[in-house]
Image (cartoon, rainbow, N blue to C red):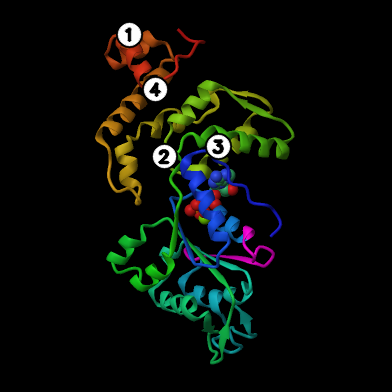
Amino acid sequence: MNDKVVIVGQSIQIQRVLTLIDKLSKTDSTVLIMGESGTGKELVAKMIHQKSQRGEKPFIPVNCAAIPSELLEAELFGYEKGAFTGASTTRQGRFELANEGTIFLDEIGDMPLHLQVKILRVIQDRSFERIGGTKSIQVDVRIIAATNKNLENEVKEGRFREDLFWRLNVVPVVIPPLRERKEDIPLLCDYFIDKFSKKFGYSLKINSQVMEIFLNYHWPGNVRELENLIERLYVLNDGGTVSVEDIPERIRFGENLLPKAVSDDLNPFSSGIDLNEVLRDYEKKLILHALNLNGWVKSRAAKYLNINRTTLIEKMKRLGIKDNENFD
Ligand SMILES: Nc1ncnc2c1ncn2[C@@H]1O[C@H](COP(=O)(O)OP(=O)(O)OP(=O)(O)O)[C@@H](O)[C@H]1O
Ligand SMILES: [Mg+2]
């Protein structure tokens, strides 16, 4: 693989993931990476591969959700000439292409049950047959799988084989959503700004007000959403400083208001919620919404919230909302 993988983050959660990657890259064990969409699952898989002894060998990704199930089997295991109509030549599957390297089974939660049996066999004896073939093929591959589903639930619902789940879940790597590690947001912004500055040939700055919005947004699309937003800002501005007006309203007010309770509900890896934290989070979001809506003029924001200006100031202090010097 050519480009060296970089994983940015200073949060304890990401530091833990990096430590785990180091350990895993020294072994050949099967890895299951779990996390919401856009949290960096493929990045983690690539880094484990790159740092491992297999690093110079192929890294072969297979997106089990993107390939129609009737084609997935041929894609994974290959086929012999004449195996079915249209099989005019013998073709190797991705397991064979990944020989000596790593296969990355992305969105494994979407793999049809009849193929799960075959995957189980590859994990157990590293062997399989091509479609239409009788000869057993041996491969030397490391298996890394990823999912944004809660596989334990899938097992309970009968959509995922329990034996395969345990085989995959030897060492789970859980990547927390961006909203649970907001201290990574400024670093990620710097990283993407640097990346897009090189690509676009000019630089953008983000002021503290915009950063405050970023820190309060709940990023349902995680790091990918942040990366896409910064790229969009580059397309729409040709240098200078990004201002609040450049940020889509959806991010400024809209989904900002989704209470943490709701977002936690949507998070399949959450085991429960902390009521006080949820209420505090919601209060902070409503106050920021009021401030943004009223151009950070506190008297107007207080009126909007039907509270006194002094109460608003107290709450802002308590909730760690920085006063914006430029306003009011
Ligand atoms: N910690 C990070 N540091 C730098 N870039 C990151 C980080 N996390 C994610 N990214 C970037 O965000 C984008 C999404 O990451 P990736 O494709 O690995 O996520 P994913 O979990 O596989 O998402 P999906 O479930 O949608 O497939 C990529 O462009 C990746 O480079
Ligand atoms: Mg992915």
For image coordinates 40% across by 18% down, the residue present is 291
Callout 4 crowding tier (Cα within 10 Å): few <14, some 14–19, many ≥20? many
At label 3, the amino acid type is: Leu
Q: Nearer the viewer, mark 2 or mark 4?
A: 2
Spatial separation of the CA atoms under disc 2 and disc 4:
18 Å
Depth check, front residue: 288 or 249: 288
Which residue, given by chain and number where applicable, does mark 2 sit on? 180
Image quadrant where one finds the N terminus = bottom right
Question: What residue did someone put label 1 on?
Answer: 309
Magenta stretch, residue numbers = 50-65
Q: Amino acid at mark 2?
A: Glu
* Residue 41 in picture, x, y percent from top left: 51, 54
> Which is in the foreground here, disc 1 or disc 2?
2
Q: Relative to the observer, which residue lies in front, 162 or 25?
A: 25
Q: Give the alpha-carbon distance from disc 1 to disc 2, as whole Å.
A: 31 Å
What secondary structure is marked by label 3?
Answer: helix
Distance from Cα at disc 4 to Cα at disc 1? 14 Å
The residue labelled by disc 3 is 229
Q: Is residue 26 above or below residue 327?
A: below
